[in-house]
Image (cartoon, helix red, strand yellow):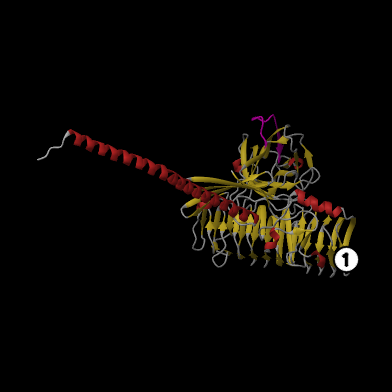
Amino acid sequence: MKKTGKAGKRGGYAMIIAVVFFLFFSSLIAFSITAPVVARIKIANDFLLTRQSLFLSEAGVEDMTYRIANGKTYANSETLALGGSTTTISVSSVSGGVQVASSGNVASRIQNMQATLASGGGVGFNYGIQTGNGGFVLNGGSTINGNIYSNASINAVSATINGTAVAADSPALLADQTNDSPATPPSSANFRNAAATQDFAQSFQVSSKSPLNYAQFYIKKTGSPANATVIIAPDNGGSPANQTLSSVTLAASAISTSFGWVQVSFPTSTPLTLIPGATYWLVIQNGSTSGSSYYTIGTNTTYANGAGMTGKYGGSWTALGADGYFRLYTGGIHSYIGGASYDGGLTIGTGGVGDAWAYDVEGTKIDGNLYCIIGSHNTSKTCDTSRGIPPSVSMPFTDANLQSWKDAAVAGGTLGSTTVGSSNATLGPAKINGNLLVNGGGTLTLNGPLWVTGTVTITNGGKVQLPSNYGKNSETIIADGIITISGGGSLGSGAAGSFLFVVSTSRCPNDINCGGSSAINVTGGAGAIAATAQSGNVALSGGAVIDAIVGNSVSAVGGTTVNYNSGLASPSFKSGPSGGYSINSWAQN
């Protein structure tokens, strides 16, 4: 056998080393070529996922912006899913509008978008009916063809809502007014002990526009007085008006012979909304007097927003020179959709479309989705709690909007009380110092906004219309008093997309000299109009037909029909404000 020498071995080692170096350098060259390619693929993949996340985030902003601008229902926080990826959308209030933020997440690549929507000087009716903290009462075979958004409960029986119904909770519970210091009152006042001091009253002014919840009094009794009644009354020249806005029983059994805080809760199904700047009275009314069975309330002289009195409700009053110890709480009321009974007399939606959304939904047939926290007696539906409680929404008209129309009216000149009878007339822009009456088959044609400092009555076949040259422009009649449309009175706008807005700034029926009347009363067919009473009630009855309603509260009975027109979301006016939300900013953040 031939042996390999040392030289052969060295040659074999050299070959192995050469192969190793060859493989090393080949690998190095291959890596130097492929590494940038792999890096570029990774960068491209990251870029693609990041762009997908950005587009998903932007889609979330677009979806929520559309919903807000067009009056669709939405929650303050929502999540949208697409192909296993998500974007979380949040809505928050900012000065002059709302802010929409969206955070897209595709494979942990987070991208954020943000937009600010300003309500600006524009106006828009986004719902068939929109109410403030006074809520909505609907019955008697009435039909709403459109959506409803209420900042309080929707009480409805034997009625149909062909759309979505949303009832938001009131603002959080707030001790709006308190007079409770020092803890031991320095003085006190007796009442129910004599005819001149039968009742006690304390005036106040609230700081926020919110529904009344409950009141507390620091009070004691002597002997065995009968139950009393706590009344909220408007002011009448510095003393309580003989008008009950809300009332509740003050049980004598809840009051001891020693001072203590006693609470009374006001009705919350149709709550009373108190208006900032207006004076109200808390009255403790008694039906009889006795020198041995009476009440005593703690007093001081430090409350700045009112005054205490004793006297007789509906009679004369005398200033105490002191203020009663009391606490007044507003807000904190859960929303409700349903009727007084669980008979299912309320129908929401048709053809599988039309949701109900509130804290509590009871006894309702719902064609769409049911979003609630609690609820029962609903036809084949259980609560979907994923949306939480709906947020409150702002009223469409601001004080600046109203002043803009008033200024435009004043620029056209001032008239006294005006009647349009069997003949026709043309008015506007103009301010009427007094009342406006259109009756006897007369027709009033508007050539600009009207501001009426008194009442507006359209009756006995009277008609208000816009001229043909208005095209799609809308116009406004704004009244400081009550507006009544009855007896065949009607309003018309002419071209499609044009509307006649009737606006009352009255607080009726929750004010003095209302006589139980609402701020706007529509009986019978009314035509293409939108009625607004943001501080009062809008009452519809007798087969009234209308395009849209906004009120602090709304009541509809007797076959009322509301036919919402989507053009009301962004109306056009010849003078005054324009319509709709505007987008102030839209950017990645």
Q: In this view, does 398 lie to the left or right of 448?
A: left
Determine crowd level at label 1: few under 14, some 14-19, many 20+ residues with C-alpha closer than 10 A: some
Name the image quarter holding the C terminus. Answer: top right
When asked about the image quadrant of residue 250, the answer is: top right
Relative vertical location of residue 43 with respect to residue 185 in this rendering, above or below: below
Q: In this view, does 7 lie to the left or right of 414?
A: left
Answer whether residue 190 is magenta in the image.
Answer: yes
Q: Give x and y (percent) for residue 93.
A: 64, 45
Q: Give x and y (percent) for residue 47.
A: 50, 47
- Which residue is drawn at the image coordinates 82% and 52% (left, top)? 406
Q: Give x and y (percent) for residue 97.
A: 67, 47
Answer whether residue 187 is magenta in the image.
Answer: yes
| Total tally of numbered discs in the picture | 1
In the image shown, does 260 or 162 lie closer to the viewer?
Answer: 162
Q: Is residue 526 left or right of residue 349?
A: right
Q: Which amino acid does label 1 sit on?
A: Ala
Give, as a single range, the part of the protein colored magenta: 178-192
- Which residue is drawn at the image coordinates 80% and 50% (left, top)? 403
Q: Give x and y (percent) for residue 445.
A: 84, 65
Element under disc 1: strand
Name the image quarter holding the N terminus. Answer: top left
In the image shown, does 94 or 587 lie closer to the viewer?
Answer: 587
Asked whether residue 549 is in view, the answer is yes
When asked about the image quadrant of residue 484, the answer is: bottom right
- Which residue is drawn at the image coordinates 60% and 52% (left, top)? 168
Asked whether residue 251 is in view, the answer is no
Relative vertical location of residue 225 with respect to residue 322 in this rendering, above or below: below
In the image shown, does 269 or 57 lie closer to the viewer?
Answer: 57
Q: Name the residue under label 1.
A: 425
